[in-house]
Image (spheres, rainbow, N blue to C red):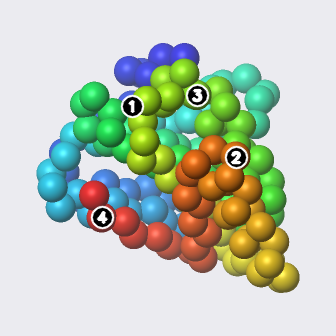
Amino acid sequence: MDFKKCSKINNNKIISTYENHKAFIINNVGLRIISKVKVDGCLITDDRIRCDYLFEIDEPIRKVIYLELKGKNIKHGYKQLKATIGYLKTRHSKVVKRFAYIIASRVPKPRGNVRELKVKMKRDYNIRLFVHIRKAEVAV
């Protein structure tokens, strides 16, 4: 895995990614060093499932955000996040603050399934999972 080739490192006030009418925006209020890593198609190029992006915040890494931009299949998005977390568990083993986001075009009914996935992510990986429709903004 070639992190340097797949990363854009900067400390801009706004760091964002857009894909198929879905957006994820980081408001970098502390002007921290953030590495935006393209996972799908760069860091992982074989046929394994993986999420779209991840963001490593600070050097050494103090916070990680895993991101999947999804249509409506939240369960598959969860599997993609879980797989990527597994692939990178050694790299991120000492990172305490880890978060996962699924930005979907819509959330399927029943919403209880989303709650269940959030509980599983917290229980199994100690990672908070957030599911948003079309757009999410976070401040770091």
First along the sequence among labels 3 and 2: 3
In space, the residues marked 1 and 4 are separated at their CA atoms by 20 Å
**Residue at left offset 47%, top offset 70%:** 136
First along the sequence among labels 1 and 2: 1
Q: Nearer the viewer, mark 3 or mark 2?
A: 2
Residue that badge 1 annotates? 7
Could you tell me if residue 20 is visible in this image? no
Pinpoint residue 19: horizontal percent, then vertical percent.
55, 59
In space, the residues marked 3 and 4 are separated at their CA atoms by 24 Å
First along the sequence among labels 4 and 2: 2
Residue that badge 4 annotates? 139
Could you tell me if residue 125 is visible in this image? yes
**Residue 44, quarter of picture:** top right
In space, the residues marked 4 and 2 are separated at their CA atoms by 25 Å
Q: Nearer the viewer, mark 3 or mark 1?
A: 3
Residue that badge 3 annotates? 89
